[in-house]
Image (cartoon, rainbow, N blue to C red):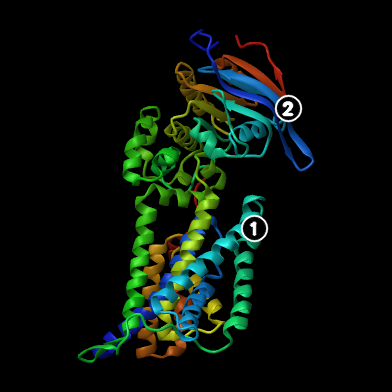
Amino acid sequence: MTAAGRVSPLALEVEGVSVSYGKFLAVESATFAVGAGECLAVIGPNGHGKSSMVTAVAGLARRGGAVRVFGAELPVADPRAAVRAGLVLVPERRHLYPELTTRDNIMLGSYMRTRRIRARQAWEDVCGVLDMFPELARLLDQRAGTLSGGQQQMVALARAMAAKPRILLLDEPCLGLAEAVARRVYDWLGEMTATEMTIVLVEENPAHALLVADRAVRMYKGLVEPLEPAA
Amino acid sequence: MSEFLNLLAAGLTSGAIYGIFGACLAVWFRVCNILNLAVGDFAMLGAIGTAELVQSDHVPFPAAVAADLAAVGLVAWLFDRGVLHFAFDRRPGGHGIVGVFFYTFGLSLVIEGVAQTVFGTDVHGAPAIWPGPAIAIADFHVQRAGILVIALAVASGLVLWAYLRFTVSGRAASACGESVLGSRIVGIDSALFRRRIFVATAVLAALFGVVESPLTGFTYLSGPTISLIGVVAAGFAAFRKPGRAVVAGLAIGVAEAMLGGYVSTSYNDVLLYAILFGIIILRPEVLGLSATAA
């Protein structure tokens, strides 16, 4: 069920996904599905495989098992295929390009669409995302490495939105942010849940996540377990 | 006045050599944070390989240049696929200082060894692309090869600057050096950028070797000296800005020529490092050494 209360086709299917680092098994046969337009929270304590799982789903780490986006299976460890399919990750700790400007950071979110054109044209293609993050308009020519943590998180979200995602994976979007900034992030997320976009929200602390999620699963010791539906 | 102009021409020529290799180093370092200490060896392969093909094998000069550049490009491509791919793509992160210079230093040693075996220890020079005597205007004389060297350096610097500044691909190349994971998230293939720019700068260095060799001559040992010159010029450009590396190289060359002409050539190296230390102390941000806010 989506926030609008309608039953929807599956946007993301994660089936038997496992991730290991050497002999250490970080994710063990994770299986869950997310309907189109639905917001799923994946909660659980740190170090139990949440980030490894979303990183592997986004094609950034080798994995076992299957990941399907709107029915089409994604190849293993191919982030370009994931972006092409409309699946975009906002990683923990953001991973911006600190020496590039805010404008360039956001623009590169559209790289798969705009890689063969001039930077100026590419910016025209994506500058609409500033409507969602008006506070970034005055920071466009500032190097991303000089922004505050909250501003950097807005840039990371804007970069993801520039990719025009159908499925957005958010890994600890409020990690290390002040409460007021975290509230701003969740206000935005609340707006996104009212759209057609599918969201997978990874959070250690369920307090915020359960406010915006349609339902939640728990990740513990590398295993995904169902959780009672959010109120 | 004529002495000044002749010193200026000599300085711009040697400065262009600094600048082009600095640009090659800077653009690749910007993309993957690795110093290409084999860039001088690629230039050596360009110069000596072309000279051998023309003089020993009697291959027509244009065909020799084309074959030599293709061979250098192939060597660079094979090195990336056979070494850098396994070193960096299969085991991302955690390379530290070893990754910054070790692999290309090893490549430099291998190329030198093979070049000594194949080409011997003699001095080689490819035929001049623009043959003829020095161009004289009153008392001002400039070598034709020198004009080509300066033109190629300036053109290369401009092309690299425009690529990085005006294209999405250029911004993506920069992003790879900033954050590999961050670039992969948006679909940028950082390994492909590393490979393409490594091959392109290797071919550019080889072409520059062909153009430059009538002026300086090359032996199998010329590579490390050239690479070191490139490292210094790239240092003046924070190892990130190829256009600035060319400008810095030209400025250093002119300053050295003036110092050598009017004072003594003994102070050339002193001047180079005095400028570098002065910038580190007074304007560290020029070299990318200033602190960055989190």
Which residue is outermost to the left? Answer: B138
Q: Is residue A61 visible?
A: yes
**Relative image position of residue A197 (x, y in whole percent):** 48, 21
Between A111 and B266, the residue placed more toward the observer is A111
The amino acid marked with disc number 2 is Ser
Quarter of the picture containing the C terminus of chain A is: top right
Q: B262 above or below A61?
A: below
Between B56 and B235, the residue placed more toward the observer is B56
Q: B113 above or below A224?
A: below
Q: Identify the residue at horizontal 55%, vertical 61% (top origin).
A: B77
Q: Distance from label 1 to label 2 (Cα)?
A: 34 Å
Element type where label 1 sits in the image: helix
Between A212 and B73, the residue placed more toward the observer is B73
Residue at which label 2 appears: A29
Element type where label 2 sits in the image: strand
Q: Identify the residue at horizontal 50%, vertical 86% (top origin).
A: B56
Quarter of the picture containing the N terminus of chain A is: top right
- Which quadrant would residue B164 be assigned to in this image? bottom left
Between B55 and B179, the residue placed more toward the observer is B55
Q: Residues within 10 Å of mark 2 (few under 14, many from 20)?
A: many
Q: Is residue B281 visible?
A: no
Residue at which label 1 appears: B96
